[in-house]
Image (tube, rainbow, N blue to C red):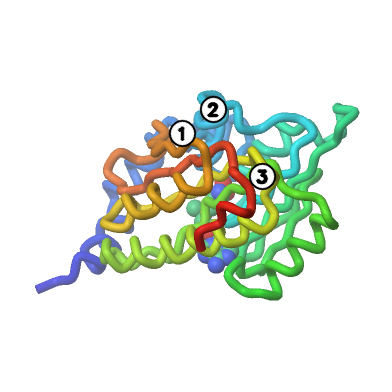
Amino acid sequence: MKSYHSILIRYMSSKSWMERHVRDTFVKQSRYQNYRSRAAFKLIEMNDRYRLLKPGMIVIECGAAPGSWTQVIVECLRINPPECYKTGAVIALDKADFAPIPGAICLPKTDFTSHISQANILSALSDRKADLILSDMSPNVSGQHDYDHERIMQLVYSTIRFSSICLKDQGNFLAKIFNGNQTEKLIEDLSKMFQKVRQVKPEASRADSTELYVLATGFKGRENQIL
Ligand SMILES: C[S@@+](CC[C@H](N)C(=O)[O-])C[C@H]1O[C@@H](n2cnc3c(N)ncnc32)[C@H](O)[C@@H]1O
């Protein structure tokens, strides 16, 4: 019997996937607005709903390539050119290579899970703390849901541990997950560290995907670290 994985690969390379991609309004819109990918619209929507990005903020963005979220962040923080007396900063990293985005501190070829990478991020922060930590990191999807869920959870927990070191009190955290059997425990863990935790499915996130975002607001401070 063919594995789900091989069926998925065949589906994605099939004409119907390509046709759907070309028809996709978010793909069209991203080309029109010069975003590097349709993912931009997920952050735009979540930002419109929850007012996450403001000029003057320090933002750490994990899993930034090809860079459409970074483009949105630079616009919202108004850092290129600096339009605000309180200029903020975005540190955008990815384990893949990606072209620099004017206004952002870009760390391509940076695996977030390595200690050296996290030390580099802390040094780019230079004693400041972050207002917002974002993760759109995603492992290479195998098509085996439980395995992919487990791997993205490892990335999310690594981001949570890092957040407890360098997030400001009352700071916010947003991370992508694939919904699965560890989601409830994740929400429980985040609820101990943050005042409010929500699960968000933006319209630009494909309805047939288990992709979901967890938004945790109001960091209670390092003394409430649970991991
Ligand atoms: C969905 S893409 C991000 C899209 C991005 N938000 C944008 O708007 O262009 C997921 C990214 O997570 C990155 N990633 C996965 N594991 C990572 C890790 N351990 N460290 C850093 N980046 C990682 C992948 O290389 C990939 O570029």
Nearest to the observer: residue 99 or residue 130: 130
Count residues near mark 3 (Cα–Cα under 10 Å), then give few for <14, some for 14-19, many for 20+. many
Nearest to the observer: residue 114 or residue 72: 114
Identity of the residue drawn at 57% across and 30% down: 47
Percent of width and height locating residue 56: 79, 34
The answer to whether any part of residue 153 appears in the image is yes
Viewer-side label of 3, 1:
3
Q: Is residue 131 left or right of residue 211?
A: right
Q: Are marks 2 and 3 in contact (CB under 8 Å)?
A: no
Q: Residue under circle 3?
A: 70
- Rounded to the nearest whole Å, what is the CA distance between mark 2 and mark 3? 18 Å
Element assignment for label 1: helix
Count residues near mark 1 (Cα–Cα under 10 Å), then give few for <14, some for 14-19, many for 20+. many
Q: Is residue 160 left or right of residue 2?
A: right
Q: Amino acid at mark 2?
A: Tyr
Q: Amino acid at mark 1?
A: Phe
Q: Residue under circle 1?
A: 26
Count residues near mark 2 (Cα–Cα under 10 Å), then give few for <14, some for 14-19, many for 20+. few
Q: Earlier in the sequence, mark 2 or mark 3?
A: 2
